[in-house]
Amino acid sequence: MDEKRQPRHDTLMSTFVVVSIVALGVVVAGLTTPPEEPALTVQPVNPVETTPPPPAPEYDIVTPEVAYPTTIPGCETVEPPVESSYFGVAGIGESSYDNPDAPWFTGPKAHLMSQALVRALPADITFARGMLPYFDPIPVYENLPEEDQFDSTSALVDVTRGDRSGFISIGVSQQTDGVPPCVAGVLDSRESMSDGTVVDRQDTWREVDGARTSTRSATAYRTDGSQISAYASATGGEDRLPFSMPELVRIATDPAFVTSTPAPPATPGNIAECNSYPGTEGVAQEFTAPVVESLSDALARADTGNLAPTPPLGALRSSVNGGALCQVVNSAAGRLTISLGSPVPSEQLREAPQGLGPIPVRVGTVVSIPTVSGLGVTLVTENPWDPAELDRIARTPALVAQ
C-alpha cells in the first residue's frame, strides 16, 4: 500500500423519514342564500402541527487509501477494490442450536468449540465482566430467502491484557464457494499451508470523527469448507491491539473449529441461549475459566434420575446478561435450566414462578440450594416435577462442595 497517499474521507448521513398525517378542513360554499346553520355537535378539526425531525448526524469517516493496481504477497492476481457495503437484520425471540440451515452446528459442538477457544486464547488475558466467550446459536431469519440465510456462528468478548484493552471475535461457518479471490484493500497477505489451508491476514484502521480504531484479522479457509475468522480491535493505534497476528493465525487454524468434525456422543451442551433464574445474577465470585470448567465437571456427575436431560449436563456458560452461569437442556419435565449464581431467597421461590429467556417459558418447579462457598444452585423445569429429584441434583456432592 502506498502510504504517501492521502487517506479517503467519506461522509455518512443517516436519514430519518417522518410521515405525518395532517387533518384538513374542507369548506363547501353554496351559490344561494344558505339555510340556517344547525348547531355544531362535533368540534372542528384543526390542522396538526408537526415538528420537523432534527438534522441527521454526519460523521467524518477516514479509512486507508487503497492503491491499485497493486501486488499482494501470496496472490497471483489482485482484483480491484470494492466499496464497503453494510446491511443489518434483526431477529426476534430466542435462537436455538437446532437450525436446519446449519446441520453441522449443534449445542454439543458449540460447547466443544467454546472450550477450545478459551484454551487457545493467551493465558494472561482477563475477560471483561467475567463473561467467557461462547459460540452462540445461528439464528433463522424468517424474512430472508434461503440463499441469504446465515451459516455462521461467533463467540465474542471484551478483554484486557496488561495495559491494553480490546475486543476479539471468532467466527466459524461452512462455505461451498471455496477460497475467494484476492481483492485490494481486503487483505495484506495470503499463505497456503501444507495441509491445503489458506490463511489471509490484514491489519487496518478506521477513524470516525478523528477517533481511530485499529483492527487485525486472520481468516482460514480449510479444504472441507470451514471458514474461521479471528478478528481483534482496539481504540487507538496498532500497538493497542491485545493480540498479535501469530496469535490470531494460531486460533484461526486450530482444528477444534473444523465444521466437518461432529461432537462425540454424550457430549454436554445447550439447546439455546440461556438466561439465569431471576435473582441469581450479581454473584461476588469471579467465574474464571478454571472455575467454570470445575463446576461443569461437577454438574456432569449429577444423578439425573428420570429427568433424562438432552444434551447431557455439564456445559455451563456465562448467562446472556452476565453475573451467573447457566445451562438449558430438554428433559422429561420439558425445558430444564440450571443456574449457578446468587442463592434465590426462599420467599422469592414462594412467589409466582418467573419465566426465563426472551420468550416466556412456562415454569413448573423451582429448587434452589446454597453451596459451601455461598453460590446458589437453582434448577427450573418447564413442567411440574418432583422437587426431591431436583434437590438431589442440586446437592451433587462435587457441586455443593465448591
Image (spheres, helix red, strand yellow):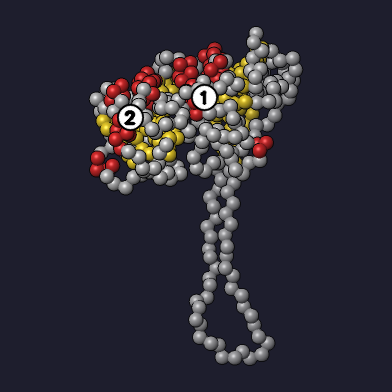
**Residue 168's spot in the image, x, y percent?**
50, 24
**Residue 251's spot in the image, x, y percent?**
53, 16
For label 2, the SS is helix
Alpha carbon of mark 2 to alpha carbon of mark 1: how far?
24 Å
Say if 220 sits above or below 156 in the image: above
Q: Is residue 169 left or right of residue 179?
A: left
Q: Which residue is drawn at 41% across and 15% down?
A: 124
Picture quarter with the N terminus: top right
- Residue 109, labelled with which disc? 1
The quadrant holding residue 360 is: top left
Q: Residue at x 57, y 62 (%)?
A: 21
**Residue 237's spot in the image, x, y percent?**
51, 21
Q: Is residue 236 left or right of residue 4?
A: left
| Residue holding disc 2 | 393
Crowd tier of the residue under label 1, counting other residues whose Cα lies within 10 Å: few below 14, some 14–19, many 20 or above:
many
The quadrant holding residue 257 is: top right
